[in-house]
Image (tube, rainbow, N blue to C red):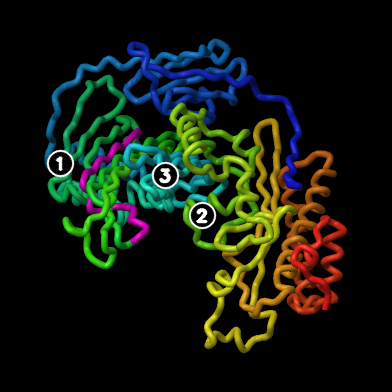
Amino acid sequence: MRLIIWLLFTIPLVGNAHSGRVVDSETGEPLAFASIGLKGSSSGTISNEDGYFNIDFAEKGDTLVFSFLGYEPFEIAYINLKERVKLKRKSLELTEFTVMADSDPYFDILAKCRKELKKNTLNTCRAYLELHTRTLNTPGEVIEMYYNAKVRSGNLHNLTYKSGRQGIAKIDNSYFLSLSTTNIFKRFRPTEGDANMPTNPLELSKRKMKTTYKLSLLSAGDNDPYFHILFEPKANSESTFSGEIFVDKTTYRPIEIKLFIENAQVKPFEPIFPSDSLVDIKMTIIQRFEDFEGDLVPSLLRFEYAFDSYIPIESDKPIGKNNLKKIKPVQSDGILYYYNHADPFIEPTFQHTAALNDYQKIQNTPYHKAFWELSPALVQSERMNESLEFFEKHGRLHNHSSVLDDNLFKGIQSIVDHTNPFWSDSTRLRFSDDFRKKLEAEETDPRYALPRRAKYHLKTEIYLDIVQTQDTVVFHSKPVFDVFESFYNLPGDSLTNPFLNIYFDLTEIEHRAMNAQINRLENPKPDAILQIHNRSTERLENELEVYLKQTDSGSNYQELLKYNEMVSQKLGIDNFEIFGIKGF
């Protein structure tokens, strides 16, 4: 039996959701990531890459504003909204490029823009990451991740993981995994720069900017609300971005910055295996900004990167014409969408204490079905639908359902490795000799001179994730065995596996008691649910410590037998029978 508890209560809906598509009024082409805002409010959303949108934040009497760079803003009453929203391209009489070289006026504009970006305003919001990767023109990976983001003006300072899911497939008998995509975003700080990112003009002083770049102005006339400035490096094009920037004429705040580089020698990623090599690296980054209650905040980061991955025949020798096994062209593109500023997610109680990469966080977090159903940042794109169908047939989907919870185990032959197991009554944990050797201390380790209790550490937690929308509160909880914080250096014997499993089962017993208490709440609120969880966590820690003491770390057969009978009574699981313990 799988215990997944959802708690829902309903209050009146704000308004009926409305779906539609934003397109060019003349060509009918979809406008990807067009902004959609509630007039007079900070509420809003964007269209997806196909131009589709869904609005659930408006009601009768509201007015919506649709906008896209290079198009006329469009206002419409919510009650009059149609399924197709047509935006009209601005009529611009463009002049020729005006090359300013070292002239001050347009360097002054960028200097003022940089000053606006550097204003010390901290904001917390939600963030959605979507990444698609193809290798040899075949889908290799798709990632969706949600975070709470801390942003200071135009710079991303921190991402706290909420939930994620992934699809992967083998290409040429190997997987391509984006282990630390979020590090790329953290390293892209327009005004601060990073040693692993090419230089952009907004991170430079005016004097340094003039020695590094030449500027061109694309003028659209006095009626145009922004300066459109193009920049090219005078030298070092392999470590310096080219690009263009749109700056508001009144406030000098950036509207959008586009960065391009080919054959980048400064790059924010490296191959997993040192013997491999990444070459011919191309990157495109587009950062969009918006106003939130007077503060300048990032709203959308679009990125593309492509490279060739070279694998040597002999890994101990340098890559060359005679030592080249394979060339893999890799293309990735995606978005990081910032939304709901000043209204972050309720963060899960289970925090990844180890320094896990993106892939490991997805693998080590229980699947929360309701979160993915209630909290979509964007309408799912046609490409995403096609990718998921592909990975379901030709690869693997992680965290798209709870099915993989049990696939982490293989009956009672389960191996606890570097993936956190989630409790299940149909599977048992077994520490393998290989795993014990991985954690085994050297003989010089002072733990060998310490008591038995000091030679191991077991950590379990009750994962709790709460989702609150306008009309619903949902929680999902699951006992998790934290293998990253646990170690076990005692000699193994016949009682070892019952001892470890009973420890995990005690966590499940407290988990059930916690859920029963939450379900008795008459008017459940997130704070009340979290308080119950905190009390359960404290009680569990005490109960587990008593268990370790009374069983003498699993060596006291009679006390362990008593706990086994208690677990059998409450959960219907007889660990002694499962592991063939007949008596001493």
Q: Are marks 1 and 2 in contact (CB under 8 Å)?
A: no
- When asked about the image quadrant of residue 577, the answer is bottom right
Q: Is residue 332 above or below residue 361?
A: above
Q: Residue 360 carries which label?
A: 2
Q: Distance between the residues labelled 1 and 2?
A: 43 Å
Q: Distance between the residues labelled 3 and 1?
A: 26 Å
Q: Quadrant of the C terminus?
A: bottom right
Give the SS element for disc 3. Answer: loop
Look at the image and tell me whether residue 338 can be seen.
no
Mark closer to the chain start, 1 or 2:
1
Look at the image and tell me whether residue 457 can be seen.
yes
Q: For the point 79% across and 57% down, which residue is it?
A: 510
Q: Residue 153 carries which label?
A: 3
Query: In the rendered structure, which amino acid carries the disc numbered 1?
Result: Lys
Give the SS element for disc 2. Answer: helix
Where is residue 10? Give x, y as percent. 75, 30
- The reply to whether the magenta stretch includes residue 107 is no
Give the SS element for disc 1. Answer: strand
Is residue 490 or residue 374 the one in the foreground? 490
Which residues are drawn in magenta? 255-273
In screen coordinates, is 270 left or right of 11?
left
- The reply to whether the magenta stretch includes residue 261 is yes
Q: For the point 38% across and 45% down, which residue is it?
A: 171
Mark closer to the chain start, 2 or 3:
3
- When asked about the image quadrant of residue 419, the answer is bottom right
Residue occupied by mark 1: 214
Is residue 456 or residue 145 the one in the foreground? 456
In screen coordinates, is 206 left or right of 375?
left
Query: In the rendered structure, which amino acid carries the disc numbered 3?
Result: Ser
Where is residue 349? Give x, y as percent. 65, 53
